[in-house]
Amino acid sequence: MANAAVRVVDHPLVQHKLTLLRDRARSTKGFRQILNEIGMLLAYEVTRDLPLETVTIETPIQAMQAPQIAGKKLVLAPILRAGTGFLDGMLSLMPSARVAHIGLYRDPESLEAVEYYFKAPSDLADRTVLVLDPMLATGNSAAAAIALLKARGAQDLRFVCLLAAPEGIAHVQEAHPDVPIWTAAIDSHLNDHGYIVPGLGDAGDRMYGTR
Ligand code: URA
């Protein structure tokens, strides 16, 4: 199967806000707020091709045929913990979306993803699932999360991140060639600790003021 596309969201608002996030001087409060704002903007882009159907409504003036979103309902699936940074922003645009939580941590030695929590709607097969993680680094967590969702029936998945390393993109495309990726930027490479360079540091720590 040919690899699904990687879409870089180059909207000026997204790029400007990403620069604000990269700045090491950004406060925890500012980081969280801006990450949510970018989540909202990415939600706009990742849903751009959702199918529409025509319904009949009555305006105060007359009846008309008007478009509404058709087809499968959405699930937002943040990978804990940094994936939750997109959640409020995305839910503000898509308030009826269901939410699946996927608990994975990165083993500091092997950099492999280890599952510690999974809770998702039971009808994943009938839904479009947006897998959320700001940082696509090695791709281990992303590939593992997508595999867990597929094992529970998900068939229509999209991966949404803020920053991607070429290594992470290659890993996800290799493991899941059917899953397209949306990102605000593709950075240079990973360092020896698995951090994206130049990146923005540890997204979870910067969101929650830990470390
Ligand atoms: N996770 C992060 O939070 N930052 C990185 O650079 C890589 C993985």
Image (cartoon, helix red, strand yellow):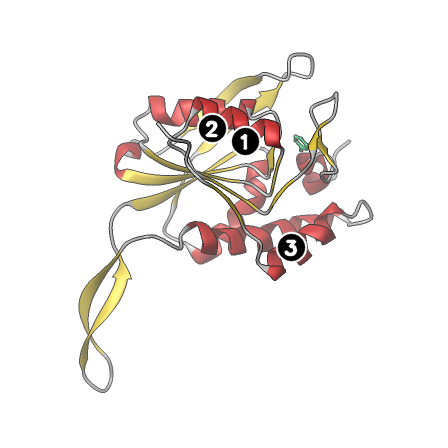
Q: Residue at x 45, y 22 (%)?
A: 175
Given the image, on which type of amino acid does mark 1 rest?
A: Ile
Residue situated in front as seen by the camera: 30 or 68: 68
* 198 shown above or below 168: below
Q: In which quarter of the image is residue 75?
A: top left
* Direction from residue 166 to residue 71 in the image, left or right: left
| Badge nearest the viewer, 2 or 3 | 2
Q: Which of marks 1 and 3 is nearer the N terminus?
A: 3
Residue situated in front as seen by the camera: 25 or 187: 187
Q: Name the residue under label 2.
A: 173
Q: Mark 1 points at which residue?
A: 169
Callout 1 touching callout 2 (CB < 8 Å):
yes
Q: Name the residue under label 3.
A: 15
* 119 shown above or below 18: above
The image shows residue 26 at horizontal and vertical percentages of: 78, 50
Q: Residue at x 69, y 35 (%)?
A: 188
Within 8 Å of ligand 1, the CB of disc 2?
Answer: no
Callout 1 touching callout 3 (CB < 8 Å):
no
Q: How crowded is mark 1: few (under 14 residues within 10 Å), some or many (20 or more)?
A: many
